[in-house]
Amino acid sequence: MKKITLLGSTGSIGQQTLDVISEHPEEFQLVSLSFGGNLELGSKAIKKYKPKFVAVKDKETFSAIQELCKEVEGVTYSYGEEGLIEAAVYHDADLVVNAVIGSVGLVPTLKAIQAGKTIALANKETLVTAGHLVMEEAEKHGVDILPVDSEHSAIFQCLQGENKKEISKLIVTASGGSFRDRSRDELNDVTVKEALHHPNWSMGAKITIDSATMMNKGLEVIEAHWLFGLPYERIEVLLHRQSIIHSMVEYHDRSVMAQLGTPDMRVPIQYAMSYPGRLPLPSASSLQLWEIGELHFEKADFNRYRCLQFAYDSGKIGGTMPTVLNAANEEAVAAFLNGKITFLQIEDWVEKALEQHKAVSRPDLETIHKVDLETRRFVGSLLS
Ligand code: NDP
Ligand code: MG
């Protein structure tokens, strides 16, 4: 029985993690969870799974959730940044599934690593903003960081039993997002609703917008750099509109390994949770390649998807540059979702934030926080 902490339980990945736990009550027990402000889904999970520890975003939600779940006994509640950290280090858990959105997941991840917890990481912003700190801390404490993101799970699966030194390159596949069939000119006045309609995956709002700008793939390239320790020159992005091949590894004998499956995030979530073993997932659809007929591939166009270029450039510069990339993107996407800027302004804002920053190499946590905050202020000032 693995004891699980789930951070971000009310989100898209969080809910699918709960599905995996429900499918395997003999294997997993949810002991600690966190969510932001979604009282409906939060209370449902507390009543069903009866965790021992619950953290929420603010004091208001903290009072409301205790009232809603007063019949559930033996639960300790907490809130705010401290609460999220307490949930992450909860003493009785073996594995922390980090499914919060944005760089708010960084400190809880570092603390969970220091507490010796295995990490199943969906929260890619954590690795983008401070990959060196997370990986160093994991190494120091002998903790595994297991990927949940489907592309990284695919690569991780292709690496099992192989020698990492024999990799020649990683090929990260990309669906192209909601606007893959539109030219740049056709992106001028797209709406939030259109941007939120992803062709293959049903995900949270922020990552769906990131997919449409391809920033998601850019963040994933940086994530892959940290998880698998390869230089950016050996990480390629390949457009593959059906999302059937989730990513590939080319070895130095030119043999290429791929992981395939129908697009279903429960598969990589469950793999991270059951690793090193595999558990059955009968409710997932079996891949019928004859029904699909053909698989399509295209070269990624860095002029069409400027965020992809920004991500490679920031990653190669390193230091605090990816922190700026991530913070500027989080702010710009939030502004777009709130109807304050246009779709194409997202990349303009990110570009402006990167241009005004002078990277600091090997930043510590304090510097990362400072740069993150300064970037958010800078991006905020573009609005006024
Ligand atoms: P969602 O927006 O659906 O969910 C985010 C979760 O984090 C919710 O539980 C939310 O709580 C909680 N949360 C948000 N802000 C805060 C905060 N300030 N403090 C505490 N908790 C907070 O996101 P997704 O599930 O789509 O994505 C989660 C992570 O997984 C992201 O990093 C994303 O890039 C990555 N990922 C997602 C995939 C997907 O299919 N969705 C695929 C691959 C990676 P509440 O809603 O209650 O406020
Ligand atoms: Mg992904």
Image (spheres, rainbow, N blue to C red):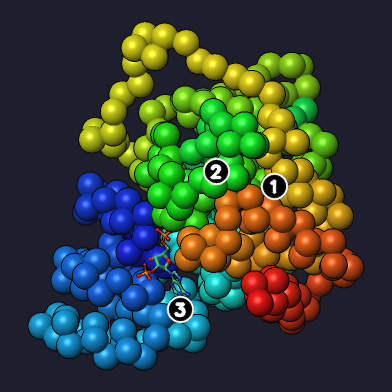
Q: Residue at x 49, y 57 (%)?
A: 206
Q: Which mark is residue 45?
A: none
Quadrant of the rendering where the N terminus is positioned: bottom left
Q: Residue at x 77, y 65 (%)?
A: 353
Which sits earlier in the primary sequence, circle 2 or circle 1?
A: 2
Q: Which of label 1 and label 3 is nearer to you?
A: 1
Q: Which of label 2 and label 3 is nearer to you?
A: 2
How many numbered badges does the structure rendering display? Answer: 3
Rendering quadrant holding ligand 1? bottom left
Which amino acid type is shown beneath numbered disc 1? Cys
Name the residue beneath numbered marker 2. Answer: 212
Which amino acid type is shown beneath numbered disc 2? Ala
Foreground residue among 135 and 348: 348
Which sits earlier in the primary sequence, circle 2 or circle 3?
A: 3
Which amino acid type is shown beneath numbered disc 3? Leu
Badge 3 residue CB within 8 Å of ligand 1: yes
**Do tag 2 and tag 3 residues touch (Cβ < 8 Å)?**
no
Name the residue beneath numbered marker 1. Answer: 307
Looking at the image, residue 46 sits to the left or right of residue 151; the answer is: left
